[in-house]
Image (spheres, rainbow, N blue to C red):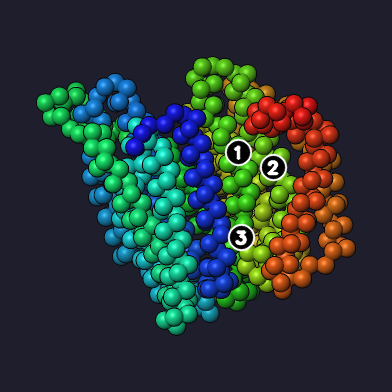
Amino acid sequence: MRKLSFEKGAFIATFCIFLSKILGLLYVIPFYAIIGEQAGALYSYAYIIYAIFLSISTAGIPTAISKLTSEYETLDMKEAKTRMFYISIKFINYLSIVVFLLLMIFAPVIAKFIIGDATGGNTIDDVSLVIRSISFAILTVPYLSVARGYLQGHRYLSVTSWSQVIEQLVRVLVVVFGSYIVIYLLKLSEVTAITVAVFGAFVGAIGSRFYIKHYLKKEHDILFVDDSKKDNVSNKAIIKKIVSYAFPYIVISLLYSVYTFVDVIIINRVLYNIVGYSQDVVETIISTYSTWGEKIQMIITSIATGIAVSLIPNLVRYFVGKDRKNLNDTLNKAILIVIYIGMPLAILISIFSGTVWNIFYGDSYYGPIIMKLFIFVAVAASLENVCSSSLQAMNKFKVLYKSVIIGILFNAVFDAPFMILFYKLGLFPVYGAMVSSIIGFLIICFITLYYLKKEEFLSFKSIYITVLRLLIPFAILISVSILFKCFMYDSLDNRFMSILYACLYFGVGLLVYFGVTIKQGIFYDILSDLLPSRFKRRVK
């Protein structure tokens, strides 16, 4: 195992992230075909609860351990560094057991809180079962967060990156083959299939854990403790540093997890108690919204955010070096990349939502309706991700807390009123929740940019100007796409034909869009830093 330069490490990490995202996107096609549309609600209930408790036990831990490992390694405090690792493992193991027991004991209480008194869909016993099944992952995933942080601190980036791919791959195999065996070979229920599927998180974590432990044993020198050279730092001081480094990330991650949980509960309550949908319809909508639709959103988040986030690490260097010009230019460019790449994809997916949904899941009534607006939530979330990452890079955690809390509170407060308003106007009520989410994310972005403009004296004029210039390409793309939809017939009962039509729609649409932006010079202005030199000359 060898250490990597920043450039090689960043490349491998980015590649593995994309590979994990692709695996996470593609497995839903066979999984959906096996368990059906409505069963996805039970799957999402389990993962929402899992995300909340995982935030408590792991969020920020890899970053904290990585920072402290690098710090002690630089100061040649090898004994303190190794002691820190074992203290972290011991602490995280105790915390994992406590969280695991809490989920096991209080699963029925949590299940009751999620579905309330609704009948006709999943029962409290069903939800309790899947929560208990996924809780096993809490026993081993926190260990991975510590080990990965420790290896990242030593710049063994390829090991941590590939461990994530292994975890995702094993999980996906268990989800797909496990649910297939349960449904088609054992002839058991969808609830049992979901129970096996969510247990895949534990199996995937075990596979990744074996991989990491193998390399830790191979590189035993980084775990060697020389008691004769004990460094002058107490265990209490080490724990205090870990907590201080991890705490901001734990708070932010927990806020988002709780927000997702509350969002699903509000949608459930409004659709069942106020709109009057039956519980089986409500759960079909929730599974489409929070499980299946979210996977299609990854087309936006993994491409747009993946490219933008590659620019974020430079913010740390420019901020520390007080290079405000490059800091300003990099942040502007990261935001514009998300808009420039994310919006045309969102427009195309929205207009051809039936075709896209059919490619992934087949025919559905609610799927295409939901994706028409839900895909734009992904763009807003990507923009918020860039803004929040910039504040983290500059250690502006107070502003980050403030912006995220305000954005989430807005969403939580206006979710139900917006849904009721849309319902009264004769529109699909879940659109109200989506509009509330989009506004909430944009509020976070606005607060972030306002603070950076006022306190850090950054300018975002180029963003406003470029967005105004992009209105013409967006309008042309929408016009061309609507014309295509009017004159081209897409047989949604044939998945192969949907793929061909999607290639045609997206190919022509993106060709027109990028052609117009190249003519305007926007293409080069935004993507110049990411283009090869030879291509730059041709575009110019």
Q: Are marks 2 and 1 in contact (CB under 8 Å)?
A: yes
Residue position marked by numbered label 1 in the rendering: 307
Q: Which mark is residue 341?
A: 2
Q: Nearer the viewer, mark 3 or mark 2?
A: 2
Percent of width and height locating residue 455: 58, 22
Dividing the picture into quadrants, the one containing residue 529 is: top right
Crowd around label 2: few <14 · some 14–19 · many ≥20 (10 Å): some
Residue under pointer 3: 293
- Residue in the picture at 23% in, 37% down: 220
Q: Residue at x 50, y 45 (%)?
A: 17
Q: Secondary structure at mark 3?
A: helix
Q: Position of residue 398 (x, y in %)?
A: 49, 32
Q: Earlier in the sequence, mark 1 or mark 3?
A: 3
Q: CA distance from mark 3 to mark 2?
A: 19 Å
**Is disc 3 in contact with disc 2, using a CB cutoff of under 8 Å?**
no
Residue at the image position 56 percent from the left and 34 percent from the top: 310
